[in-house]
Amino acid sequence: MPSSATQPLSDSDSDASSPTHSSSSSSAHHRHADLSSSIFQSYLSHSTSSSNHHHHQQQQQDLTKIQSFLTSSRSGALSCLICLERIKPSDPTWSCSSGCFALFHLLCIQSWAHQSTTLAASRASSRAAVLPDDNLLVWPCPKCRVEYPKSQTPKNYFCFCGKVQDPPRDPWVLPHSCGEICGRALKYECGHFCLLLCHPGPCAACPKLVKNKCFCGKLDDVRRCGFKNFSCNDVCGKLLECRVHRCVEICHDGSCHPCREKAAYKCQCGKVDMERECCDRNFRCSNACDEKLGCGRHVCERGCHEGECGDCPHQGKRTCPCGKRAYEGMACDVTVPLCGATCDKLLSCGFHRCPERCHRGPCIETCRTVVTKSCRCGSLRKQIPCHQELTCERKCQKMRDCGRHACKRRCCDGDCPPCSEICDRRLRCRNHKCPAPCHRGACAPCPLMVRISCSCGETQFEVPCGTETEQKPPKCRKLCRIAPLCRHASICKPHRCHYGACPPCRLICDEEYACGHKCKLRCHGPKPPPNPEFTLKPTKKMLNHVREMTPGSMCPRCPEVVLRSCVGHHIGAERMMVCSKQADFSCDNLCGNPLPCGNHYCTYVCHALKSQSSKSDAHRTRGSCEECTLPCQKEREPACPHPCPLRCHPGECPPCKTLVKRSCHCGSMVHVFECIYFNRMSEKEQMAARSCKGPCHRKLPNCTHLCPEICHPGPCPLPDKCSKKVTARCGCQTLKKEWLCQDVQAAYKSTGTDPKDVPKNQYGVGLLPCDSDCKSKVKIPEAELHFRQTKPREEKESDKANNISKRRRRKQRVHEEQSVSKLQRIVAVIQRALLILIIAVVIIASAYFGYKGLVWLSDWMNENEARQRRRRYSGV
C-alpha cells in the first residue's frame, strides 16, 4: 500500500472538496488507489536519505516523464500510434526502448515491421537483380524512427522491464507491468540498476551515493550516481595547450577553450610583429620570402615560412616540358630547350593524349577528339567532341519507387532517383498530412503528441495526435485559482481545479436587510467569470471572447412577520404583517396630531405622517396633516387694536407694523406712526410726539383769532386776553378804529352780547357811534350790488365752457391721429408678411425645379453613356 511519504508524487482520482463528502471520498480513494506511489516506493527509500535539496529537485525532474506515462495509463489515455485505438489493460503491447518509449499494440507493430521490411526488400530487388540479405533489412520505430533489424521484430508480449512474458493482469498493479523491481541498467553505464517497480518510459537517474571529483578535479564530494559529474563553481585553473596560461573559466565539463590571452608575436619568417591571441600565435604574413637560394641566382618563391628555404629547384638533372629528353650539367639559370616531339601527355578526359608539340605550360583543357557516343538511356548514338556529353530529349516513363509518379527525367540511365514529391496524404490522425517524400505502402503514424492538461496546467499527459478527441481532461488536485466574488469569499471552502464555471456557493446568504433581519436563502451573490470549457482546438472567437462575471441576484423581500402600527401611529391599532410588505393601513380614528400652528389639532381620518424619527412623536413634521386656515386670534403684546394679519401660527405674533394716523393737538397736521412704536410710548411721550412744534392753529372761542401758544393739548389758555388788533366800525361802516380784541370782547359783553354769537364779517361792526358824515352818504341797494356781482361770474362760466370745449376738440383730434397711425401700422405689417411669403414660395419652387432638372440631367447622361457602351460592345 502507498505510504504517506509518497503522497506528494501521486495524483488522486478523487476530489473531496467538502467535509460532507469525506466518507465517500475515502471509499473512492480505496477503490481507485494511486498506483504511482507503489511504483516509486522502493526508489524513494534510497533518495529520501539525501540532504541536498538541489539534487532532490533534479530527481523530481527526471521522474516527470515517468509520471506522465503513469498519468496517461491511469486515465486510460494510452493509444496506439499505428491504429489510433485505445490500448486496453488486457491488450498485448510493445514499447520502444531506444528513446521515445512509445507504446504500441503487439499486432500493430508486427504488421508495421513486416510491411517496412517487405517494402525495403522490394526496393532493393528493383534496383539490383539479387535479393538482399534478411540481416540487412531494418524497420523504423513509428514515432522516433530509430531503426531495428528484422531479427528484432517483436514476437511475444513482455512487461515494461522485459523480464516477464505475458504479465498477468492485476488491478493493484500498473497495466502491462509485472509489479517487480525494474532492474534495467541505468544510463551513463554507472553499473547500478533501476530500483523502481516495472514502469513505462525511461528509468530515472541513479540514486546511489558515490564519491566523485568535480570537473576540474579540485573538490571531492558525495553525490548521486546519476549526477556525479558536477561543477565546484570555482576557477578551473587547468594548464592550457599553450603550456603557459591557465583556464580562467568556472569549473566546466570537457576540454578547456583555446587560450585567448593577447600578446605581440612574430610571423614564421620573423618580418612582421602583430598582437594576436595566444592560440593563434603561429601565423604567416602576406609577404614573399625573397631569400637567396643556394645557387645564389634565384630567390625563394614560397611565402612566409619557417626554417631553411632549400636548394634551387632548377639544379641537377633537367628535362624538356614533355619529359622525353633529359639534360645534365645545365646551369640553373639556362632555359631548357624544347625537344620538338609530340607532347603526348594524358588529357583531362583520361582517354586521349595531347597532340601538340612539346610546349611549355599546361595542355589544352578540353579534348576535341571526335568520338561516337551514346546517350545515357541508349536511344541515341552520335559523333561529337570528346569533352561534350550526349543527352537526348526522351523522357523516362519508368515509375519511381513510390509507384505513383513517373520518372520523367530526360535521358535517364535507368537508375531513377527517389521521388522528390511530397507524399501529402492524409494521416490516420485526420489532423495532418504526411510530410515525407512520396513512398509506397502506408504512411508513418503522425509523430506529434497532443498535450492534454487541466485548467491550471499543473496536471497533464500526452496522447498521440488523433486520439485527443476521445480524451477527458485529467483530474487535478490543485486548488482553483479563481477567487469567489460573493460575500463568503473569506469563509468559503476552496475547490479543485476544473474547467467551466465554478460550483455555486452553498452557504446561507445571511445578508442584513435594511429592516435589520437577515436573508436565510442560499448564497445568490455574483459569480466569477468561468474558466473556458475543455476544448483542444479553440476558435478565434473563443480566444477573443472576454469572459465576464455573472452578476448576483438581489435578496428577496424580507419574509419575517412583524407587528406594525397604523399610519397614524395610534396606540392599540397595531396589526401583524410581513416585514417587506409596504401596504400601510389606516385605523379610521381621527388623526389628533397637533397642527404646525400648535394651537389646534388635525381633524382628518388616520393618515400617514412624515416623521424624522419613528421612536419619538416630538420629531414629526406635520406636512401630511391639514393646514390650519383660521386667522390668528392671539392678543398682541403690547396691547394693540389691530388683529394679526397671519394665519394661525405657532409662537408669538410678529410686531404690528400697521401705520397709525394721529393729528397734532391743534389739528394743523397729521402724524403717521407704526403701531408698535406708538403703543410702546408712555402717555407723556405720546402727547409730546403728537405736537407739531408750531403755533397753535385753533381759533379762540370768543373771537376769530388763532391761539398764540405753541401746539398744545387741551383748550387754549386765556381766551379773553386776546391781544390781536381788530378794526372797530360804526353801524354804517363809515367810521373805523383799531381796538384790541380783548377790548372788543369786553365791549360786546358790556352790551350783553356774547362774542361767540357775532358773525365773522360783522365782528367789530356797530361798536362805534355814527356821526354826521355817515348820514349824507348814499346807500347802494343790495339788489344792484348783487346784480353787479353776478354778471362777471356768468362771463367767467361761459369762458370756462368755451375752454372745456376746445380741450375736448383737441383730445378728439389726438385720438383720431392715433387711430389713423395704428391702421397704417397694421397695413404695413400685412404687406411685409405677404412679401416674405412670396419670397419663400419663389425659393422653394426654384429649389424643387432645380432638383428635378439635376435628376433629369443625370438620367440623360446615364442613358448616353449606356448607348456609347452598347455601340462599343456591338463593334467588338
Image (cartoon, grey):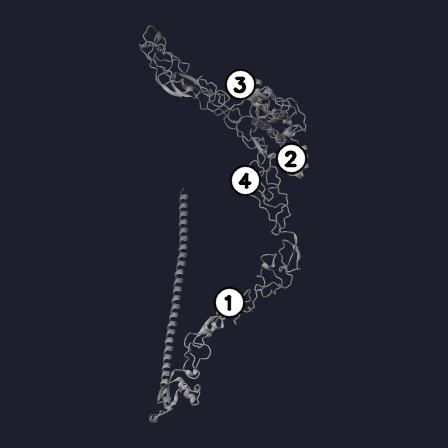
User: What residue is pinned by disc 2?
Assistant: 14
User: What residue is pinned by disc 3?
Assistant: 128
User: What residue is pinned by disc 1?
Assistant: 655
Disc 1 to disc 2, how far (Cα)?
Answer: 91 Å
Give residue 781's position: percent from left, percent from top: 37, 92
Circle nearer the viewer, 4 or 2: 2
Q: Are marks 4 and 1 in contact (CB under 8 Å)?
A: no
Q: Are marks 1 and 3 in contact (CB under 8 Å)?
A: no
Q: Is residue 655 visible?
A: yes
Dot 3 crowding, Cα within 10 Å, few <14, some 14–19, many 20+: few
Please tell me in which quadrant of the rendered image residue 227 appears.
top right
Disc 4 to disc 3, how far (Cα)?
Answer: 58 Å
User: What residue is pinned by disc 4?
Assistant: 542
Disc 4 to disc 1, how far (Cα)?
Answer: 82 Å
Q: Earlier in the sequence, mark 1 or mark 3?
A: 3
Disc 4 to disc 2, how far (Cα)?
Answer: 30 Å
Q: Is residue 58 above or below residue 718?
A: above
Q: Are marks 1 and 2 in contact (CB under 8 Å)?
A: no
- Image quadrant for the C terminus? top left
Circle nearer the viewer, 1 or 3: 1
Circle nearer the viewer, 3 or 2: 2
